[in-house]
Amino acid sequence: MSYCQLSGTNSCTNVKVPSNKGVFLTFTNTFHEKYKNTIAVEYVFLGCGGGNYELENGDVRIRASCMSSSNGRLIKIQTVSEKKLILIPFEKGEYVFERD
């Protein structure tokens, strides 16, 4: 996984998660975020653990207990394929997930 971490209002810094650590997203009947050899403070997507999701106009709306709104957050899907998922949760930056 790699992502562009916000570093100010108009820029972001590219971050590559080391190969001995991992952030994993699962979309089955529910949404789940889990970590391998790391914690959410170090490398995080939403940091919510899990919740529900639904596809909405080609993007994904995630609702998790740590979110301030019961409406959740609509996250732009930039790319989805058998091997790669690229999400844009903020105005700047992207999260690149590769199938394990």
Image (spheres, grey):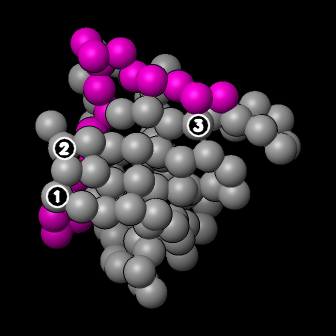
At x 38%, y 62%, the residue is 79
Q: Is residue 91 above or below residue 69?
A: above
- Residue indicated by mark 1: 82
Residue corresponding to mark 2? 99
Which quarter of the figure has residue 55? bottom left
Q: Is there CB contact under 8 Å for labels 2 and 1? A: yes
> Which quarter of the image is occupied by the C terminus?
top left
For the residue pair 97 and 56, the one nearer the viewer reads as 97
Q: Which residues are magenta?
A: 13-30
Q: Which residue is mark 3?
A: 4
Residue under the point 19% across and 50% down = 83
Res 8 quadrant in image: top right
- Closer to the chain start, of discs 2 and 3, is 3
Q: Residue at x 40, y 22 (%)?
A: 17
Q: Element under label 1?
A: loop
Query: Dividing the image into 4 quarters, which one contains the N terminus?
Result: top left
Q: Amino acid at mark 3?
A: Cys
Amino acid type, mark 2 = Arg
Relative to residue 97, is residue 82 drawn left or right? left
Q: Is residue 19 magenta?
A: yes
Identity of the amino acid at label 1?
Glu
